[in-house]
Amino acid sequence: MKNAIQPLVPRIPGSKQAHLKLWKSILDAHSYKTMYEPFAGGLTVSNYLLQRDTLTLETVVCADIDPSLLGLYEAWTTEHLQHQVYGRFHNWQEYPIKDVLKHLTVTYEQAWIDYETNTIDAAVAGLLLRYVSFNGKLAPNASSQRLNIDFSNQQITKWGDFNYTFPLSPNHLYLYDDQKLIPWDLFNSQPSIAIIDPPYVGTVGNVKYRDPDFIRPVYFKHQPHARETLTMAFFPVEEALSNDITVAIACNYYSDKLNDDYASLAHDYGYRIFNFDGIPPKLNNGGKSQREPYYRDSYWVFCNPGDPLVTILSDPDLN
């Protein structure tokens, strides 16, 4: 396995780049032809499968609500849009960063308000803002849909030197702005894998800022303590299993409720389920005063009872 992949979205939090090593046996278990990523983010796992030596992946089916990401995905498979991205990308870096930050910020914010905003401008604004922000975070203000960015001095000194190229794209890309629109039965006769990595959910309810289980939103429209966010962790998994996805990986913070719900889904649709610890979270997990994170990053793997993965995932050394 390669140590790194060429990213489609450089410097994006929650990219699952660190999980690739954990998931090597899963990603190597089948000659996957179709990838489903209903919460696309950086499409890291799709890009890994597209860039590995034994390329079998042909189709990526994905969704995301971030308009800057949607514009980038659209350009990924469209040559004339790629040229537009490259042109705007390099033109903006010819100006001093202090002269363009306001424009990039307004462009990104406006794209969330008006989806008719030029998607190429939104894509480039997202790329450049993530490049100069701390840890690639484009977090909203707590009381409004305005950016509250911590800029990285180290990254700002590299302004003008940031180069970007699109990685290898799939033969077929199906792109949606809402995960509810994904057609899970599109290619259910082919070996398929789903990475279900929704906005992470914490304690559902009225959690206060000073509470140890409080989670600050890390991107626009992220509501860590809303029941709707919990729903997003459940229903795409049910859609995947009910449509005979070969392997599904669901990521979230661990809770007994989510674990029980996933176990019920596995039983109802005839899957085996395995739960493992993921990567210790770094993004404002459990309040600033906590020495140990309140929540535990976790992932659940679903596969058929006769899948060779069952033997591999049953190895106690993996737990």
Image: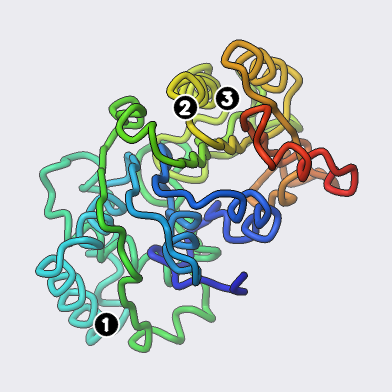
Specify the label residue 76 is tagged with.
none
What number is the disc on residue 225? 3
Judged left or right of residue 291, residue 213 is left
- Across and down, in percent, residue 193 comes to 49, 41
Q: Residue at x 71, y 41 (%)?
A: 297
CA–CA distance in space, label 1 to label 2: 42 Å
User: Mark 1 or 2 closer to N-term?
Assistant: 1
Amino acid identity at mark 3: His
Give the total of numbered labels: 3
Which residue is drawn at the image coordinates 31% and 77% (left, top)? 165
SS of the residue at dot 3?
A: loop
Q: Indicate the position of residue 248 as horizontal and vertical percent values.
A: 55, 36
Tag 2 residue: 240
Residue plotted at (52% across, 55% down): 15
Which numbered disc covers residue 93? Answer: 1
- Mark 1, mark 2: which one is toward the viewer? 2
Q: Say which element carries label 2.
A: helix
Q: Is residue 178 above or below residue 158?
A: above
Three-letter code, disc 2: Ala
- Where in the figure is residue 319, as x and y percent of width and height? 85, 42
- Considering depth in this image, is 42 or 221 the residue closer to the camera? 42
The numbered mark, 3 or 2, whose residue comes first in the sequence reads 3
